[in-house]
Image (cartoon, helix red, strand yellow):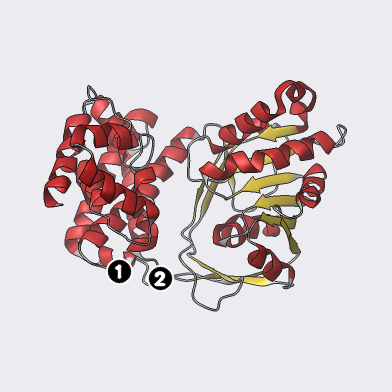
Amino acid sequence: MKAVHFGAGNIGRGFVGLLLHQGGYELVFSDVAASLVDAINAASEYTVREVGDGGTDTVVTGFRAINSASDPQALIDEIATADVVTTAVGPTILRFVAPHILAGLALRDPSRPALQVMACENAIGATDTLRDEIRAQAGDAWDAISNRAVFANTAVDRIVPAQPEGAGIDVTVEPFFEWAIERPPFGDAPPHIPGAHFVDDLAPYIERKLFTVNTGHAATAYFGARAGVEKISDALADPSIAARVAAALEETSALLVAVHGWDAAELAEYRSTILRRFANPALPDTVGRVGRQPLRKLSRHERFVGPAAAAAERGLATGALVDAIGAALDFDEPDDEQSVEMQRRLREEDAATFTAAVTGLEPSHPLFAAVEAVVRLRQSEL
């Protein structure tokens, strides 16, 4: 069995690639970073180190890497004979992945089992997005090749912090992980991925992850940055920050109960698990790294505005989420392009214009006025 994985970074090697290796797949990484590709190809193994309670070290072997920028044909040939294709590149990069998969499908022997494609991104319906890109680029040729692949959405969760200097291609991760995958697209032949679990309806798992893990992680970063704290674990050691993050997650949990019928007690335990993970002092994660790209994180269907808007539409509480949005507006990191742009726009645009453009909310939306108020507050401080 062979798996092609787009994105040879820390998530690719320390999470998705690791589980594919444990499933017995020959592993082919694809990346555009020449130095990383060269480092992978110069090594015969790498170690995934879990830090924290119950952590173990796992040695990964049986891999190679291809530079998709300089040798696209080699990548296409690998896809044509692969069993599985996965990605961990970021949702905005999927459109650049699509042409390679399309070309691989065009070369694929129609008698082979369908290629199993899963985009492992922090986004709702990322695999659907990738499939739609491939279909659009295929045009009239899509009908002839569409049965050569099956596409399944996934929800992935593992904290992979910034790596220690000199780690090479070894990866430090937390012990916890979750990989939920849609079962129906695969029929009776799902991929063999130890530790992954297959579900009939993925939406509750995706939103539970995005609105708890992603919302909580970012909220911790922004409240921590506001307080002048450097590390995520140190931020949660501050009782006032921990209380604000917990309050935001109580609001997202109320939404998850209302929309998906999750058991409230189960969600409370899930929240506690998530906060314990963030507080793990063995993970050297910083508020600067987790908080980067604030404009994306404040967009309409992301971790703050997405759940807050849905909660407001149902008459549920949103005050703690709006508080976290206000903290995000304070994020002023000179090394992050989006942070710089956000602070510039806060100075140049009026509150209503900024709120509508950044959050995607209509002025008539029940959440708009509350968000506009925290925007105006931030502008008064500038």
> In the rendering, at what x and y percent does residue 8 appear?
63, 59
* Amino acid under disc 2: Pro
Taking the image as drawn, is residue 273 in sight? no
**Which circle, 2 or 1, is nearer the viewer?**
1
Q: Which residue is mark 2?
A: 284
Which of the two residues, 318 or 96, is positioned nearer the viewer here?
96
Please tell me whether mark 1 sits on a helix, a strand or a loop.
Answer: loop
The residue lying toward the viewer, choosing from 378 and 239, is 378
Within 10 angstroms of label 2, few (less than 14), some, or many (20 or more) residues? some
Rendered location of residue 311, percent (x, y): 27, 31
Vertical arrangement, residue 158 with respect to residue 353, above or below: below
Circle nearer the N terminus (2, 1): 1
Callout 1 amino acid: Glu
Across and down, in percent, residue 228 comes to 22, 66
Image quadrant where residue 357 sits:
top left
What is the residue that sits farthest to the bottom in this orientation?
A: 166
Find the residue positioned furthest to the front.
Answer: 348
The residue where tag 1 is placed is 230
| Tags 2 and 1 touching, CB below 8 Å | no
* Horizontal side of residue 381 vs 156, given as left or right: left
Q: Residue at x 15, y 52 (%)?
A: 382
Q: Can residue 323 be spotted in the picture?
A: yes
Residue 381 vs residue 105, the one in the foreground: 381
Up-down: is 290 above or below 370? below
Count of numbered marks: 2
Left or right side of 185 for 350? left
Quadrant for residue 132, please give it.
top right
